[in-house]
Image (cartoon, helix red, strand yellow):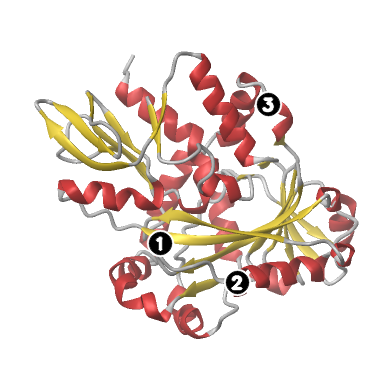
């Protein structure tokens, strides 16, 4: 049985950029991140923003985040992420075919843009990390960029192309197709909010806003709300919401033919079924604060600077909560000290990439052999 408090796919899956990026193994906290802390607190346009009002509540997570940026920790965490992400594109291609939506998977690579080679060199550590784990990367000059995407601004003269990455052209419809396939095979969907999880005679009792439920095994995949669910068990999950924003421009998906990353701005552009979508950046402000119009406005301004053809097209804004562990490594597996309870949380902005492999890892553990 799948229990969801809302319509499946309406959470952060609804608004992500659809990236299937198995080489994205560099944790968010890389060496040198400490130097960016002042801008996180003072620069309203910073790609990584931390609300000063939320700072006291975020300090425990932030301390662990900064501590995870040590080189040896980064390498160890990159290895863990590689183990979870490896083969993601092939896994999604197989799943899209199985559930009848192969047209939603665009296998056209990802293109990372830089103003020049010097700007690209600033990300040398990230690209070296990806290459060291076997990712195929191609460095491009302006001519190479124009060959792939002739409509991009002339100011981008250097790029890295990852040909083996993919894009889901409508993450919401993709999730809906997964749920339909689940139901067609006898699965059940219950629309309810789980308020409490507790052991009960060798089983698990789930208290919802409806009737209590009993089960032998339970998987907690509640995203940014998982800490609240687990708190009743005395479990402290050090997880924060990476509040992510997107702006979508209806009818303009043809402006690009693949996911394009403005690496100097830390934002993604993706062609969706229903239009061009721009998103990215991270805001740490908790679950309760209202969306920031300024964060969405930054994205809209960048999109219009890149594509003057968007003049006169209204941008539709969205914000969602991406659950992030301090070290960027998701928690996938058995809950320590709680037999029959399993966790699949903390995937940050790579939940779609890791979704199929996460499900397989849990399925193998729950049903060995």
Q: Which residue is mark 3?
A: 101
Q: Is residue 87 left or right of residue 157?
A: left
What residue does disc 1 label? 287
Q: Residue at x 59, y 25 (%)?
A: 95
Q: Which residue is mark 2?
A: 293
Q: Compute the Cα span from label 1 to label 2.
A: 16 Å
The residue lying furthest to the left in this view is 201
**Where's residue 61, x and y in %?**
32, 66
Q: Quadrant of the C terminus?
A: top left
Q: Considering only vertical position in the picture, is 164 above or below 46?
A: above
Q: Is residue 216 visible?
A: yes
On the question of residue 156 being in view, the answer is no
Where does residue 355 sit, x and y in percent of width and height? Answer: 49, 37
Kindly indicate the quadrant of the structure image that contains residue 121: bottom right
Rendered position, 360 above or below 84: above
Q: Is residue 171 left or right of residue 1?
A: right
Looking at marks 3 and 2 on the same chain, the residue that comes earlier in the sequence is marked by: 3
């Amino acid at each position: 049985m799948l229990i969801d408090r809302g319509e499946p796919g309406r959470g952060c899956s609804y608004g992500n950029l659809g990236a299937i990026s198995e080489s994205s193994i560099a944790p968010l906290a890389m060496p040198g991140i400490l130097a960016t802390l002042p801008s996180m607190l003072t620069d309203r346009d910073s790609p990584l923003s931390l609300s000063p009002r939320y700072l006291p509540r975020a300090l425990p997570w932030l301390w662990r985040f900064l501590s995870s940026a040590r080189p040896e920790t980064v390498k160890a965490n990159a290895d863990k992420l590689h183990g979870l992400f490896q083969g993601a594109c092939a896994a999604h291609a197989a799943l899209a075919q199985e559930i009848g939506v192969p047209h939603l998977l665009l296998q056209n690579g990802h293109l990372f843009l830089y103003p020049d080679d010097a700007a690209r060199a600033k990300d040398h550590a990230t690209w070296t990390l990806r290459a060291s784990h076997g990712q195929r990367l191609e460095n491009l000059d302006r001519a190479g960029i124009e060959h792939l995407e002739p409509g991009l601004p002339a100011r981008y003269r250097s790029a890295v192309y990852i040909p083996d990455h993919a894009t889901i052209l409508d993450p919401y419809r993709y999730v809906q197709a997964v749920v339909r396939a689940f139901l067609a095979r006898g699965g059940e969907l219950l629309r309810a909010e789980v308020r409490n999880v507790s052991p009960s005679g060798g089983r698990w009792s789930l208290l919802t806003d409806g009737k209590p439920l009993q089960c032998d095994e339970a998987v907690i995949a509640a995203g940014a709300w998982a800490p609240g669910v687990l708190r009743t068990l005395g479990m402290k999950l050090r997880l924060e919401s990476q509040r992510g924003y997107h702006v979508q421009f209806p009818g303009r998906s043809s402006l690009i033919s693949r996911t394009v990353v403005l690496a100097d701005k830390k934002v993604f552009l993706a062609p969706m079924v229903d239009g061009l979508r721009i998103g990215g950046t991270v805001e740490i402000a908790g679950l309760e604060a209202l969306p920031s119009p300024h964060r969405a406005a930054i994205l809209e301004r960048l999109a219009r600077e890149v594509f003057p053809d968007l003049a006169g097209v209204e941008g539709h804004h969205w914000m969602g909560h991406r659950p992030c562990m301090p070290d960027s490594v998701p928690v996938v597996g058995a809950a320590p000290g709680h037999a029959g309870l399993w966790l699949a949380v903390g995937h940050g902005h790579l939940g779609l990439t890791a979704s199929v492999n996460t499900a397989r890892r849990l399925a193998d553990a729950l049903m060995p052999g």
